[in-house]
Image (cartoon, grey):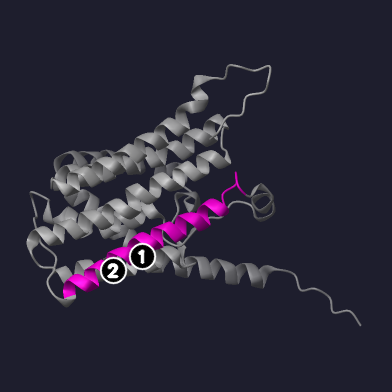
């Protein structure tokens, strides 16, 4: 969000800077993740990516709430997301496998190709997302309205799914090392999924009845307790559930489109 002050206006509300401050914090977390990946300190590197995800979730909502969305904010957000959820996870996974001494010969080449594919997928997805953002293309959004799904895997979710092996390996209660071939294949597949047009789950598509509020609050409380007690294992579980939701969400979206086409009135044929 870049604020252009008029010639007579030399002040603006501090609250208008909140979205950009949150985005900057997410960017700093991405840089911290790279720093700790090089040391290496896996707990802090993974924690920095998680913090970046929290700040990323807050900045967009703050911008919409304060009505200060802009092209500058959209571009800054994409740069932050690319670093925190594109570059940082790829570097973390690569350095993690290097520290295990498993990237030898052809496997090292495949690993490099997979992690580059992942980072490029994040860059291309974010470039497309930024070009389609309301602040960059308001006319298109006014015409199309709000979509109930993401098209392609969002970069924060992609980072979470790609880091499942690292979450599991660094969980004190589980500590399972996934075979390196699986780690490499997972990163490659996620990189491809980010640039596809496959419908992905979005909270915007969720509608709750009144009776669902109380169970939801209880579930959130249990999830928070699990995050405190088993943070990495819980994050791995959440990321796994998201990955499993991909085919279900795609089927639901295609069925909804088919129902909309069937319900649309037929146009009379002119003679």
Q: How many numbered marks does the figure carry?
A: 2
- The magenta region covers 107-136
**Which residue reaches farthest right?**
271
Residue placed at 56% from the left, 53% from the top? 131
Residue placed at 49% from the left, 55% from the top? 127
Q: Residue 77 in the image: x percent, y percent?
A: 45, 43
Density class for disc 1 (Cα within 10 Å; few <14, some 14-19, many ≥20) is many
Left or right: where does residue 134 sit relative to residue 89? right
Disc 2 on helix, strand or loop? Answer: helix
Residue 126 on the magenta span: yes
Q: Residue 110 in the image: x percent, y percent?
A: 23, 73
- Helix, strand or loop for the magenta stretch, by majority: helix
Tell me the number on the disc at residue 191.
1
Q: Is 190 above or below relative to 67?
A: below
Residues at marks 2 and 1, CA–CA distance in whole angstroms? 8 Å
Whether residue 223 can be seen here: no
Which residue bears the numbered disc 2? 114
Label 2 with label 1: CB-CB less than 8 Å: yes
Q: Residue 258 in the image: x percent, y percent?
A: 59, 72
Front residue of this view, candidates 100 and 183 = 100
Q: Residue 120 in the image: x percent, y percent?
A: 38, 62
């Amino acid at each position: 969000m870049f604020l252009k002050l008029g010639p007579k206006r030399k002040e603006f509300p501090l609250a208008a800077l909140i979205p950009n401050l949150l985005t900057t914090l997410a960017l700093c977390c991405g840089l911290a993740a790279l720093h700790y990946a090089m040391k290496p300190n896996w707990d802090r590197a993974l924690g920095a990516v998680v913090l970046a995800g929290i700040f990323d979730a807050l900045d967009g909502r703050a911008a919409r709430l304060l009505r200060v969305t802009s092209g500058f904010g959209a571009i800054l957000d994409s740069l932050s997301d690319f670093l925190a959820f594109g570059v940082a996870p790829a570097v973390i996974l690569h350095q993690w496998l290097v520290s295990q001494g498993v990237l030898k010969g052809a496997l090292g080449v495949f690993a490099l190709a997979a992690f580059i594919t992942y980072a490029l997928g994040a860059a291309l997805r974010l470039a497309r997302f930024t070009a389609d953002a309301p602040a960059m293309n308001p006319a298109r959004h006014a015409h199309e309205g709000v979509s109930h799904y993401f098209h392609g895997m969002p970069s924060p979710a992609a980072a979470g799914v790609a880091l499942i092996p690292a979450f599991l390996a660094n969980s004190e209660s589980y500590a399972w090392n996934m075979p390196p071939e699986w780690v490499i294949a997972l990163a490659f597949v996620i990189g491809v999924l980010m640039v596809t047009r496959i419908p992905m789950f979005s909270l915007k598509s969720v509608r709750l009845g009144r009776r669902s509020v109380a169970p939801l609050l209880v579930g959130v409380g249990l999830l928070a307790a699990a995050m405190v007690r088993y943070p990495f294992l819980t994050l791995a579980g959440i990321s796994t559930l998201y990955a499993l939701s991909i085919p279900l969400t795609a089927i639901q979206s295609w069925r909804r489109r088919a129902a909309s086409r069937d319900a649309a009135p037929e146009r009379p044929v002119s003679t």
